[in-house]
Amino acid sequence: MDPVKPAEVLVATGNKQHRDPARRDRPLRGQDQRDSPPGEAIVGTGRISAARMLTPVLPTLPFTKSQLATLDDALVRASRRASLHFGVYLGDLGADTRGRAEVLHDSMGKWADEAVLVAVSPGQQVVEVVTGCKAAHRLPDRGCKLAVESMIASFKQGDLAAGLASGLRILTDHTGS
């Protein structure tokens, strides 16, 4: 039998008889339980109750198709209106959230100088806005702070897509030429 890993959730999968037929109808002793591999228990009838991990269900996506379309539209509008490249990252940012967000921003390549990245880590409850050199001259810190506050308000209500779209609109509104 495969050992059960500590992080796995145990799920009963059915009947299994004790390996030793002579022990099937004997009362349980403490030693019988200690001899069982992880994820197995010998019950009073001598039957072994085994647990195995079921195939995990794939995680659901954070956005519906409609929300993705709205977010895509918000990104396109922001980029066109401000003449800057906007990007959104959603996921874990690690221990150094700002450093990771800056690395992600730099990965925008030749557009990085004129780019704004909104990096959101819902699990860490962190929002980072990173601007390239040229974008920083056109987008004041105050505008970034207002956008972050707006996004956080929507995130607290459980609306990730609306928060991102709102943040992009505010960033665009505060972009000077």
Image (cartoon, rainbow, N blue to C red):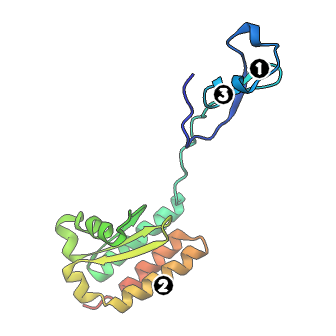
- Secondary structure beneath label 1: strand
Q: CA distance from mark 3 to mark 1?
A: 15 Å
Q: Amino acid at mark 1?
A: Arg
Please state which of the two labelled residues, at mark 3 or mark 2, is closer to the viewer: 3
> Which residue is labeled 1 in the image?
47
Question: Which mark is first along the chain, 1 or 2?
Answer: 1
Q: Tell me the residue that label 2 is attached to.
A: 149
Residue 11 located left or right of residue 43: left
Residue at 24% across / 82% down in the picture?
135
Q: Residue 48, image x and y in percent?
A: 72, 22
Residue 174 place in picture, x, y as percent: 36, 90
Quadrant of the snapshot with the N terminus:
top right
Kindly report which numbered mark, 2 or 1, lies closer to the viewer in this rendering.
1
Amino acid type at mark 2: Glu
Residue nearest the viewer, comparing 51 with 36: 36
Q: From this viewpoint, is residue 26 visible?
A: yes
- Disc sitting over residue 34 in the figure: 3
In terms of sequence position, does the residue under pointer 3 or pointer 1 come before the other? 3
In the image, is 29 to the left or to the right of 121?
A: right
Estimate the x, y position of residue 102 in percent, counting from the top left. 28, 70
Q: Is residue 174 visible?
A: no
Q: Are marks 2 and 1 in contact (CB under 8 Å)?
A: no
Q: Amino acid at mark 3?
A: Arg
Tell me the quarter of the picture where residue 55 sits: top right
Image-based side of 77 in relation to 124, left or right: left
Local secondary structure at mark 3 = helix
Q: Residue at x 31, y 88 (%)?
A: 175
Q: Marks 2 and 1, Cα distance to the nearest angstrom?
A: 59 Å
Residue drawn at 79 percent across, 22 percent down:
28
Q: Residues within 10 Å of mark 2 (few under 14, many from 20)?
A: some
Give the quarter of the image for residue 172. bottom left
Q: Quadrant of residue 101?
A: bottom left
